[in-house]
Image: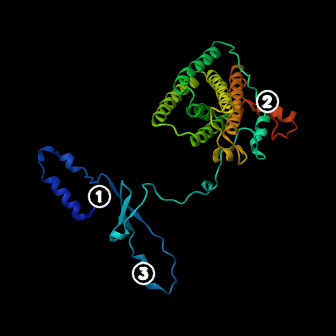
């Protein structure tokens, strides 16, 4: 069957027929000014794109070849919105399917894979066994007491959010953490985005926040991808996660615009609850309620675990990550309250105390009025 899509390039005969059909219509609907304007006849869903094929340089003696190449006209191909094309004069066998976008070569920078990095340096060395994971210190009894109205509101909002989660998931811990990690990956991305835009508006450095916040969001996403390999959420659970994520993103966005201090405090308390949840999961595994199966390959590669790692090892690793996010967000909220948001000077001093060699003198470079 002949294609219903025609190329953009209109021949003189088709143009004449189109203009005659317009003139045969009732002249009462056209004014003199209307007919005086040029008429554009554009097919609604097709365009004609001319490709100029660069011929290889021919030897000067081959005049016939060069002459034919000079008189060779560019080839026109008609593209439809559905991605099919047919070269003019080509047979049906030459018709191919191509993507809608222009096919370019992959840029060199995209050829180098960038793998997500874990949060702790302990995960970047040798392969970690269960004993190694248990030896990494973690403060399970940590709790940041609310220090004001803002902190009190943040804490009780987080506590109230746990009630419907407990009622819905009950003992389905794997499905609970899937929903938890979907939400937990939102704050770092939202905060990093807003601080990125703030840095652009002010034309100044962000103080060392953006890269960490985006790293935090990526780490939480790796938690989600890990648990997706273990549990297969139902369609209803996936729809619930999508709805919760959509609501939480917009609420957290608005909260960060109003009070970034409160927003980071909310995340700190959320991470406190995450540490508690993973501790309960470890207790259930120890009691035999949850099966301690083999760890997914994605978790072994990401946290640098042994090939014989189990789900318990994954819980230990993720709980360590959540503890890092807990302390970090409480610290960031405190810095905002103290109006000491530039991390670089303090990091410089800590590097000097630990015998590290800083790249610049922070007191001279970063305390200028420009702050860049």
Please indicate, yes or no, whether residue 271 appears anywhere in the rendered image.
yes
Of pointers 1 and 3, the one earlier in the residue sequence: 1
147 shown above or below 317 = above
Count of numbered badges drawn on the protein: 3
Of pointers 2 and 3, the one earlier in the residue sequence: 3
202 shown above or below 77 = above
Query: Looking at the rendering, which quadrant does residue 201 occupy?
Result: top right
Nearer mark to the viewer, of 2 and 3: 2
Tag 3, which secondary structure?
helix
The crowd level at tag 3 (other Cα within 10 Å; few <14, some 14-19, many 20+) is few
What residue is at 45 percent from the left and 69 percent from the top? 53
Nearer mark to the viewer, of 1 and 3: 1
Viewer-proximal residue among 103 and 267: 267
Residue indicated by mark 2: 346
Tag 2, which secondary structure?
helix
Please give the label number shown on residue 250: none
305 shown above or below 329 = below
Residue indicated by mark 3: 67
The crowd level at tag 2 (other Cα within 10 Å; few <14, some 14-19, many 20+) is few
Viewer-proximal residue among 357 and 68: 357
Of pointers 2 and 1, the one earlier in the residue sequence: 1
The quarter of the picture where the C terminus appears is top right
Tag 1, which secondary structure?
loop
Measured Cα–Cα span from mark 1 to mark 3: 34 Å
Residue indicated by mark 1: 5
Query: Looking at the rendering, which quadrant does residue 149 occupy?
Result: top right
Kindly give the residue lying farthest to the bottom in the view shown.
61
228 sits left or right of 121 in the view = left
What residue is at 22 percent from the left and 64 percent from the top? 13
The quarter of the picture where the N terminus appears is bottom left
Kindly give the residue lying farthest to the front in the view shown.
288
Q: Are marks 2 and 1 in contact (CB under 8 Å)?
A: no
């Amino acid at each position: 069957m002949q294609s219903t899509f025609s190329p953009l390039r209109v021949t003189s005969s088709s143009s004449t027929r189109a203009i005659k059909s317009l003139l045969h219509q009732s002249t009462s609907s056209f004014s003199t000014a209307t007919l005086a304007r040029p008429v554009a006849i554009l097919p609604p869903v097709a365009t004609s794109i001319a490709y100029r094929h660069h011929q290889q340089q021919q030897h000067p003696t081959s005049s016939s070849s060069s002459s034919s190449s000079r008189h060779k006209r560019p080839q026109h191909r008609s593209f439809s919105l559905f991605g099919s094309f047919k070269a003019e004069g080509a047979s049906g066998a030459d018709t191919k399917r191509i993507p809608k976008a222009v096919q370019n070569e992959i840029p060199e920078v995209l050829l180098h894979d960038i793998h997500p990095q874990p949060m702790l340096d302990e995960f970047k060395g040798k392969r970690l066994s269960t004993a190694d994971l248990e030896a990494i210190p973690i403060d399970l009894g940590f709790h940041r007491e609310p220090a004001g109205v803002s902190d009190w509101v943040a804490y009780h909002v987080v506590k109230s959010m746990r009630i419907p989660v407990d009622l819905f998931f009950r003992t389905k811990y794997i499905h609970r953490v899937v929903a938890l990690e979907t939400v937990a990956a939102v704050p770092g991305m939202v905060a990093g985005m807003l601080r990125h835009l703030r840095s652009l508006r002010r034309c100044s450095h962000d103080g060392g926040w953006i890269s960490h916040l985006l790293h935090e969001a990526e780490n939480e996403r790796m938690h989600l991808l890990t648990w997706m390999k273990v549990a297969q959420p139902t369609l209803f659970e996936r729809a619930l996660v999508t709805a919760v994520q959509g609501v939480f993103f917009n609420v957290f966005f608005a909260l960060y615009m109003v009070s970034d201090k409160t927003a980071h405090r909310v995340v700190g308390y959320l991470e406190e609850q995450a540490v508690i949840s993973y501790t309960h999961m470890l207790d259930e595994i120890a009691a035999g309620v949850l099966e301690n199966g083999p760890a997914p390959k994605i978790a072994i590669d990401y946290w640098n675990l042994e090939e014989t790692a189990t789900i318990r090892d994954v819980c230990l690793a993720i709980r360590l990550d959540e503890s890092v996010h807990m302390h970090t967000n409480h610290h960031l909220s405190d810095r905002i309250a103290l109006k000491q948001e530039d991390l670089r000077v303090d990091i410089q001093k800590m590097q000097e105390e630990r015998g590290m060699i800083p790249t610049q003198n922070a007191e001279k470079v970063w305390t200028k009025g420009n702050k860049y």
